[in-house]
Image (cartoon, rainbow, N blue to C red):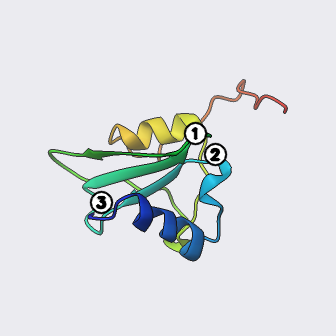
């Protein structure tokens, strides 16, 4: 994954149809799913950080083949740590906070 700020900005804007300056996190992976990059706008500028797994691959959630998936913070944390999401689920008592 060789894209920098401008390349990731263009992917988020053109291919995903999103506004990269919205404050959302945009997560990108290479074809082998061994590297991740995150792009985020914090109000003053774009930030990008990356992670490479030494062994194994990142397990992308189902439906990700469409190119766009929305995740909860907990799911992003699991994915970033190399944990598969297919068996992870929230407990029945879990309630999403109303906005």
- Is residue 26 left or right of 30 when viewed as pictured? right
Reading the chain from its start, which is encountered first: label 3 or label 2?
Answer: 2
Q: For mark 1, what is the residue?
A: 42
- Spot occupied by residue 54 in the image (x, y as percentages of width and height): 15, 44
Determine whether label 2 and label 1 are within 8 Å by CB.
yes
Tell me: residue 66, above or below residue 91. below
Mark 3 against mark 1, which lies toward the viewer?
1
Q: In the rendered image, which quarter is residue 43 located in? A: top right
Q: Residue at x 72, y 24 (%)?
A: 93
Q: Earlier in the sequence, mark 3 or mark 1?
A: 3
The N terminus, quarter of image: bottom left
What residue is pinned by disc 3?
33
Marks 3 and 2: CB-CB under 8 Å?
no
Q: Is residue 58 visible?
A: no
The residue indicated by pointer 2 is 23
Can I make out residue 94 in this image?
Answer: yes
**Residue visible at 57% across and 75% down?**
14
Judging from the image, what secondary structure is the residue with disc 2 in? loop
Give yes or no for contact between labels 3 and 1 (Cβ–Cβ under 8 Å). no
Q: Is residue 84 left or right of residue 88?
A: left
């Amino acid at each position: 994954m060789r894209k920098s700020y401008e390349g990731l900005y263009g992917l988020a804007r053109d291919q995903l149809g999103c506004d990269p300056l919205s404050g959302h996190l945009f997560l990108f992976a290479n074809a082998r799913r061994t590297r991740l990059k995150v792009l985020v706008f914090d109000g003053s500028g774009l930030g990008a950080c990356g992670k490479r797994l030494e062994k194994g691959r990142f397990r992308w959630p189902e439906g990700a083949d469409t190119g766009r998936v929305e995740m909860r913070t907990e799911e992003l944390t699991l994915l970033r740590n190399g944990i598969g999401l297919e068996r992870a689920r929230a407990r029945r008592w879990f309630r999403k906070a109303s906005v």
